[in-house]
Image (cartoon, rainbow, N blue to C red):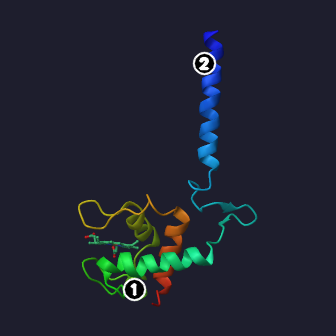
Amino acid sequence: MVRRWQSIISQLFLITGMAVLYNPVYAKDNQIDASNNQPTSLSEQRRAELKDLLLQDCGSCHGMTLKGGLGPALTPDVLHNKSRQMITVTITEGRPGTPMPPWKTILSEQEIHWLVETLYSGVTP
Ligand code: HEC
């Protein structure tokens, strides 16, 4: 009898877990396209939102044109001799002990990847 309850309860957990996992509200937009193993592209709307984020949020510290402020410049000429990996880690994890915050709680890996590529090629306001 006890075993039966245990099994019912664990099944309930499994079902709620799956529901959370497959709920689009919680799903981050970071599926991989099986055909070429590349992240599926972000929607045009999401890219526009991310560009706003770069200019407004990142811009509030890095300068409205990203040429530097409280934080260093994030322009292609400055970034081109810095490694993409270091830049990606900095955006993902932030820089503890400095005002640079981590972004992994609100952005997916794919979105951060897009931000990095956009910074290296230059953000036009
Ligand atoms: C609250 C202020 C603040 C915000 C907001 C902020 N940053 Fe920063 N960021 C900093 C500071 C300060 C540093 C320098 C940290 C240090 O001293 O190492 C930094 C460093 C960085 C670096 C490393 C640059 C280098 O040359 O090593 C990158 C990349 C970066 N930020 C990207 C971003 C992006 C992208 C955003 C927006 C998604 C953002 N930051 C938002 C303050 C901020």
**Left or right of residue 54, residue 23 in this image:** right
Of residue 45 and residue 94, the one placed in the foreground of this image is 45
Query: The residue tagged with tag 2: helix, strand or loop?
Result: helix
Quadrant in which the C terminus appears: bottom left
Report crowding for label 2: few under 14, some 14 to 19, many 20 or more residues within 10 A (C-alpha). Answer: few
Quadrant in which the N terminus appears: top right
Tell which circle, 1 or 2, labels the residue nearer the N-terminal end. Answer: 2
The percent position of residue 94, horizontal first and vertical second, equals 35, 63
Amino acid type for the residue under numbered disc 2: Gln
Q: Ligand 1 closer than 8 Å to the CB at disc 1?
A: no
Q: Which mark is residue 75?
A: 1
Number of the front mark, 1 or 2 = 2
Amino acid type for the residue under numbered disc 1: Thr
Query: The residue tagged with tag 1: helix, strand or loop?
Result: loop
Residue tagged by mark 2?
Answer: 6
Q: Residue at point 31% right, 84% down? A: 63
Residue 117 visible (yes or no): no
Q: Residue at point 33% right, 87% down? A: 67
| Disc 1 to disc 2, C-alpha distance | 57 Å
Residue 93 visible (yes or no): yes
Quarter of the figure with residue 6: top right
Of residue 1 and residue 70, the one placed in the foreground of this image is 1
The total number of labels drawn is: 2
Q: Is residue 20 above or below residue 82?
A: above
Q: Is residue 21 above or below residue 29?
A: above
